[in-house]
Amino acid sequence: MYGANKSLINLIEGLRVYDVDILVLCPEDGALVENLKNLNVNHIVRKFSNAHHKTTRSLFKVPFKLFSNLIFLLKSGWVKEFAPDVIYSNSSVVFIGSLLSWKYNIPHIWHIREFGYLDYKLKFDFGSSFLTYWRKKTSKFICISNAISETVLPNVSIEKKFIIYNGIVRKMELEQYTVRSLKTDQRMILGIVGLVSPVKNQLEAIRAFAIVNKVYPLTVLRIIGDGDGEYLDLLSLEAGKLGVRDSVIFEGYMSDPSSVYDDLDILLMCSRNEGMGRVTVEAMSRGIPTVGYANGGTLELINDGQNGFLYNNGYEKLSSKVMELLGNKSLYIQMSEACLREVERKFTVEEYSKKVSEVLFGLKN
């Protein structure tokens, strides 16, 4: 239940106010299926494979993946039974929707949530030309940011693609969150949330935190998420070398990070290529400012100096931005208030599902 699946659940909840009948196809049992069951959402589990790889070694699996998808197509009679008006793929790595669209001649919407190689080092199994071929057959694209649209689909016409930011919180939920303030005489908590991986750059967060901690010794850095085991070991070693191992808390994956945001004072977003940055908006919805790297979708979420800070040029610059915020209580309050306003304006589930529904019904009509 990382970003894409959380956003799918938000979308399904939001679409309930529209006349939409949904069947969700899942490749295996897991957290997503449990969430769908809890929401009483119609779903089926059928094994299929994605069409991307990370390493040359994983290319050897391509024939087996292709074979499994062919078997899947031969046993896809349930599509006729459900008779959908639209096939919707929730991620750029989900390729099976293109094949179902082709086989049953049903319009296809492809929701592009990732850069692919820039953020996850993913390459398409059959090369860029083959991917371009299937993208040409796609009816409409939804991109989660302008950065995704311009980088992943630069040659797709504007009539065929829509920029729709993920909806993170319902308007009713947003009302319970209030403007935050800093208590610099107490423990202050920095956090970095998400997949633990070199592309998310938790290492930079630790190095910046070591500088901050010398000036503000009551600060703590919480690293929430799991992932690359070797990288986790590297992070722990680096924290030890810098003398902050006792102040860096590795908390692992949390299916519901609500309690994290309850305690967090500042979010760090160190990823160089974030498609949008769901956790950034999650923090903003609680009135928590973010200090984020000035690139990708992060540029579209943070108004520098207003609802957070942008930085570049490494961990020293990150640490200086964090300390600038920690040292200015009135600025912190102003940013916290601006975060709540921005989320209400652009990132609610209601706004998200309304815009997606317009794309869906636009295809049907």
Image (cartoon, rainbow, N blue to C red):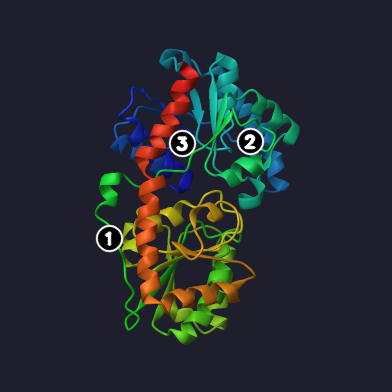
Reading the image, the residue beneath label 1 is 178
Location of residue 58 by image quarter: top right
Q: Nearer the viewer, residue 61 or 155?
A: 155
**Secondary structure beneath disc 1?**
loop
**Secondary structure beneath disc 2?**
loop
Residue 239 coordinates in the image, percent (x, y):
53, 77
Q: Is residue 34 visible?
A: no
Look at the picture and state if 312 lies above or below 219: above
On residue 121, the disc is none
Q: Residue at x 34, y 79 (%)?
A: 187
Residue 229 coordinates in the image, percent (x, y):
55, 62
Judge left or right: residue 330 versus residue 67. Answer: left
- Answer with mark 3 or mark 2, whichever residue precedes in sequence: 3
Residue 327 coordinates in the image, percent (x, y):
42, 80
What's the amino acid at mark 1?
A: Thr
What's the amino acid at mark 3?
A: Glu
Reading the image, the residue beneath label 3 is 28
Q: Nearer the viewer, residue 67 or 160?
A: 160
- Answer with mark 1 or mark 2, whichever residue precedes in sequence: 2
Reading the image, the residue beneath label 2 is 51
Q: Is residue 359 visible?
A: yes
Q: Residue at x 38, y 28 (%)?
A: 43
Residue 196 coordinates in the image, percent (x, y):
53, 60
Q: Nearer the viewer, residue 65 or 264?
A: 264
- Dot 3: within a 10 Å radius of its alpha carbon, few (fewer than 14), some, or many (20 or more) residues? few
- Dot 2: within a 10 Å radius of its alpha carbon, few (fewer than 14), some, or many (20 or more) residues? many
- Dot 1: within a 10 Å radius of its alpha carbon, few (fewer than 14), some, or many (20 or more) residues? few
Of badges 3 and 1, the one in the foreground is: 1
Distance from label 3 to label 1 (Cα)? Answer: 39 Å
Of badges 1 and 2, the one in the foreground is: 1
